[in-house]
Amino acid sequence: MNKFTLLALILCFIGIAFACDDFNPNTSTIGQCTGSQKVGWVPTDNAPVLTPADLDPTELAVHEERMNYILQMGTALKRKFIASIYHQNGTLMCTGVNMGKPNIISHGEIVAINNCTAMHGITVFTNYTLYTTGEPCAMCASALLWADFKTIVWGTYNADLLCKICMSNIPMDSAYIFGRYYGLRSTAPRVIGGVLRSQADAFFGSYCSNPNSIYYIKPRCACTNTTSPLKIEQTQYSSWFEGGVTKTQFGGVITNTAQYTVTNPTFTSTGVKPTSIWGMVNEANTDNWSLQWYPVIQAGQTYSFGYIITGTEPITFQPTA
Ligand SMILES: *[C@@H]1O[C@H](CO)[C@@H](O)[C@H](O)[C@H]1NC(C)=O
Ligand SMILES: *[C@@H]1O[C@H](CO)[C@@H](O)[C@H](O)[C@H]1NC(C)=O
Ligand SMILES: *[C@@H]1O[C@H](CO)[C@@H](O)[C@H](O)[C@H]1NC(C)=O
Ligand SMILES: *[C@@H]1O[C@H](CO)[C@@H](O)[C@H](O)[C@H]1NC(C)=O
Ligand SMILES: *[C@@H]1O[C@H](CO)[C@@H](O)[C@H](O)[C@H]1NC(C)=O
Ligand SMILES: *[C@@H]1O[C@H](CO)[C@@H](O)[C@H](O)[C@H]1NC(C)=O
């Protein structure tokens, strides 16, 4: 063995020694979980989605004009998914149309992003707003988050595309993705849904009776009942004079008329504030109420509360949907 062979062997041994220094889950603190715990995600809320009613009229007018532009484009081109990208200075930078080319993931948003990069060399979209006729699918919402768009605006909602219009789509609200910005960004993008919603819905039309269309999917959607199943009945128990005013005691019974359990219901009240109340708690002196005791009402079960007020008229409690 000459000295070069020896050196090679030593280097090889050092290499092997380092190569063997593998990740050891027993001693690693990655994920900070121990024992029988497993690594998971911190529960995260969806991003809030603004609607036209939340915007001031000047801003809304700008979004409507731009939405109208891509709806017109789509009508002229006989294509459904059109996107446009504006700089924050108001300049239209580029558009994108889903033509199914060059491949099936060439959605309007993706085409527009690639178009802006090709036309203007834009690589990060921090100062840009994206418009799209239909709410971004899960793939595009992820792409928009990566691209760092600060504002995203759509006409028709995903839930309507899939559930009412019978168009194939990933069944997910984009707000689910936009709310999960943590690994990429410090804040969620500003998200605005339903701009020119009825025009956009009409533009998409319906594929529900057209199962041969390439877009068609038989919807498998859940309907969420927005009417509270809680019914409230109140009884006046007694009335008396006290310190020169009339005081009245009422008892209330909340009945769950649904076939399912209602958990943590909330209520809003109108009328004078009670001088004392039991079974309901007021949130920070507002007209908002929640149940004081075990806040779960099983199907068909009831929950009782009571209060004393000045006067003789009962407070009206409305369940919040
Ligand atoms: C981790 O701990 C388990 C159980 O004590 C043991 O069987 C395993 O060999 C350890 N793994 C390593 C890489 O040390
Ligand atoms: C707005 O910004 C874009 C991108 O920098 C630029 O190309 C465009 O000329 C600007 N438009 C105006 C009106 O300043
Ligand atoms: C790129 O955007 C421009 C508008 O700025 C548009 O005329 C052109 O058709 C778009 N190209 C593609 C491939 O969509
Ligand atoms: C966005 O615009 C601001 C000024 O409004 C500028 O300071 C910043 O560098 C821009 N960001 C990018 C990524 O272009
Ligand atoms: C919605 O809930 C209300 C109250 O429980 C009920 O009367 C109504 O029938 C429900 N509607 C549907 C469509 O299930
Ligand atoms: C009262 O409840 C309603 C509906 O849940 C909510 O929108 C409102 O912000 C609440 N008001 C206060 C003052 O907490």
Image: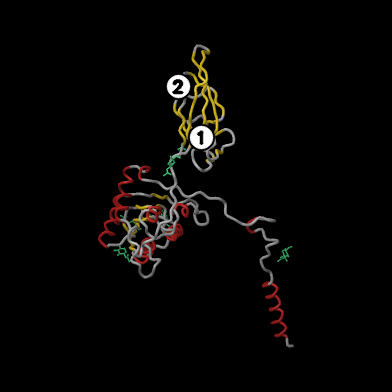
Nearest the eye: 170 or 27: 170
Q: Is mark 1 within 8 Å of ligand 5?
A: no
On residue 179, the disc is none
Question: According to the image, what is the colour scheme of the structure?
Answer: secondary structure
Looking at the image, residue 260 sits to the left or right of residue 35; the answer is: left
Within 10 angstroms of label 1, few (less than 14), some, or many (20 or more) residues? Answer: some
In percent of width and height, residue 179 lies at 48, 51
Earlier sequence position, callout 1 versus callout 2:
1
Q: Please rate how many residues cluster around mark 2, counting C-alpha atoms within 10 Å: few if below 14, some from 14 to 19, many from 20.
A: some
Q: Which residue is mark 2?
A: 313
> What residue is shown at x 67% (from left), y 68% (from top)?
22
For the residues labelled 1 and 2, say whether their Cβ atoms are less than 8 Å apart.
Answer: no
Residue type for callout 2:
Glu
Residue in view at x 30 percent, y 62 percent:
79
Q: Is residue 90 left or right of residue 176?
A: left
Residue found farthest to the bottom: 1
The residue that mark 1 highlights is 255
The reply, left or right, for residue 120 in relation to residue 284 is left
Left or right for 237, reference 96: right
